[in-house]
């Protein structure tokens, strides 16, 4: 690929933070079966969109001068929301399913490291996984212009949280109207994704009462948007929030799913929000398991940092086993 597609790391350090930057340790092989459009026709709110979806790669720096370089697949300018399915090799019925919402600041989707690789991990452990491609804020098709747009977005984002106080909502952090507006559309996509999976549960061997969602960063906010909408048609049976998600000032609904949460204390963006969400769930007497690490930052994903946070997926696996969402789990 040309260097024009590469966001300069020094100019946009937040780029690294927004991404989960490592490959998952994979179990048994699992192959993406197909991608399914979740809406019939053009979804409401994007009838006049004309941008072209773009898939591209960016380099991911590794520790040490001798470390092998990695690259990450990204997607932007999504106009047609889809679900990409990953099915376990074992042909058993009544499996659990999880819809994965990648992060990316509503500017791109971290498709590989917060989407496809996570889905393969789930499928390798007997869970049907779907990666949601949701609508995003429009960006320039020209790579150089996109670089400039993203640098401006990062600058505004950084200024919005530079007061020294940790933000308490995503609204405080999103610096532009486009991001706030597209969140509404992306949240509608997330709710529709749940409806779509559950409507096809019989043909895919999925138990309709074991459909959950997992989100990274802004993808986790979409998960809480789905939960707080309290729509019976798009309810989820379990949820995992990885450095993201909020309830704001809304009261916790009577019926909410059990939560699995992960965050790091040195994440200056999400640590306060995560603590608030945990407290809200806990005070409401709802089931929640919160893994709060002292180091890890934002966007640690599954990157090996030689820190305790590296093992958060082991904890997720055991949590799912205890809730009968996954079979026997080995590290």
Image (tube, rainbow, N blue to C red):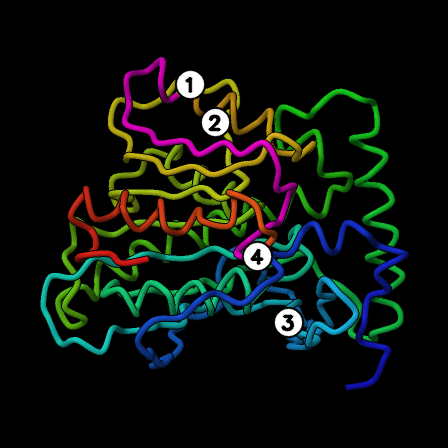
- Which picture quadrant has residue 268? top right
1 or 301, which is in the foreground? 301
- Magenta region, residue range: 281-304
Residue occupying image coordinates x 37% and y 65%: 121
Q: CA distance from mark 2 to mark 4?
A: 30 Å
- Which picture quadrant has residue 141? bottom right
Q: Which mark is residue 170?
A: none
- In this view, which residue lies farthest toward the left? 93
279 or 181, which is in the foreground? 279
Residue occupying image coordinates x 38% and y 74%: 36
Is mark 1 in CB contact (under 8 Å) with mark 2? yes
Is mark 3 in CB contact (under 8 Å) with mark 1? no
Residue occupying image coordinates x 35% and y 18%: 282
Label 3 or label 1, whichever lies nearer to me, is: 3
**Quadrant where the image shows the N terminus:** bottom right
Label 2 or label 3, whichever lies nearer to me, is: 3
Q: Which residue is mark 4?
A: 304
Of the two numbered discs 1 and 2 on the same chain, state the one appearing first in sequence.
2
Q: Which residue is mark 3?
A: 72
Q: Position of residue 91 (x, y in %)?
A: 13, 76
Label 4 or label 1, whichever lies nearer to me, is: 4
Label 3 or label 4, whichever lies nearer to me, is: 4
Q: Which residue is mark 2?
A: 247
Q: CA distance from mark 3 to mark 1?
A: 35 Å
Please, what secondary structure does the residue beneath circle 2 have? loop
Q: Please, is residue 316 above or below residue 34 in the view?
A: above
Q: CA distance from mark 1 to mark 2?
A: 8 Å
Label 2 or label 4, whichever lies nearer to me, is: 4
What main secondary structure does the magenta stretch of the protein show?
loop
Of the two numbered discs 3 and 4 on the same chain, state the one appearing first in sequence.
3
Please, what secondary structure does the residue beneath circle 3 have? strand
């Amino acid at each position: 690929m040309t260097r024009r597609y590469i966001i300069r790391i020094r100019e946009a350090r937040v780029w690294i933070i927004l991404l989960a930057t490592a490959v998952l340790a994979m179990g048994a092989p699992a192959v993406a079966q197909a991608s399914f459009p979740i809406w019939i026709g053009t979804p409401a709110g994007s009838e006049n969109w004309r941008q072209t979806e773009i898939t591209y790669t960016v380099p991911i720096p590794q520790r040490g001068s001798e470390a092998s370089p990695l690259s990450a697949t990204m997607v932007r300018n999504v106009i047609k929301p889809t679900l990409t399915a990953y099915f376990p090799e074992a042909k058993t019925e009544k499996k659990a399913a999880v819809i994965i919402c990648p992060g990316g600041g509503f500017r791109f989707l971290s498709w590989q490291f917060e989407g496809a690789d996570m889905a393969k991990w789930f499928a390798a452990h007997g869970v049907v996984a779907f990666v949601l491609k949701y609508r995003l804020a429009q960006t320039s098709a020209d790579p150089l212009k996109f670089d400039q747009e993203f640098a401006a977005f990062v600058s505004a984002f950084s200024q919005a949280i530079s007061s020294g106080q940790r933000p308490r909502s995503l609204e405080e952090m999103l610096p532009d109207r486009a991001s706030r507006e597209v969140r509404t559309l992306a949240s509608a996509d997330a709710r529709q994704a749940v409806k779509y999976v559950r409507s096809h549960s019989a043909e895919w061997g999925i138990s309709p009462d074991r459909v959950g969602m997992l989100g990274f960063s802004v993808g986790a906010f979409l998960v809480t948007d789905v939960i707080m909408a309290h729509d019976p048609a798009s309810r989820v049976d379990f949820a995992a929030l990885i450095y993201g998600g909020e309830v704001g000032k809304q009261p916790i609904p009577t019926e909410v799913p059990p939560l699995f949460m992960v965050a790091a204390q040195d994440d200056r963006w999400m640590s306060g929000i995560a603590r608030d969400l945990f407290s809200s769930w806990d005070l409401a007497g709802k089931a929640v398991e919160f893994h709060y690490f002292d180091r890890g930052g934002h966007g640690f994903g599954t990157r090996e940092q030689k820190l305790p946070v590296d093992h958060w997926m082991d904890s997720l696996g055991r949590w799912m086993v205890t809730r009968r969402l996954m079979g026997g789990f080995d590290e």
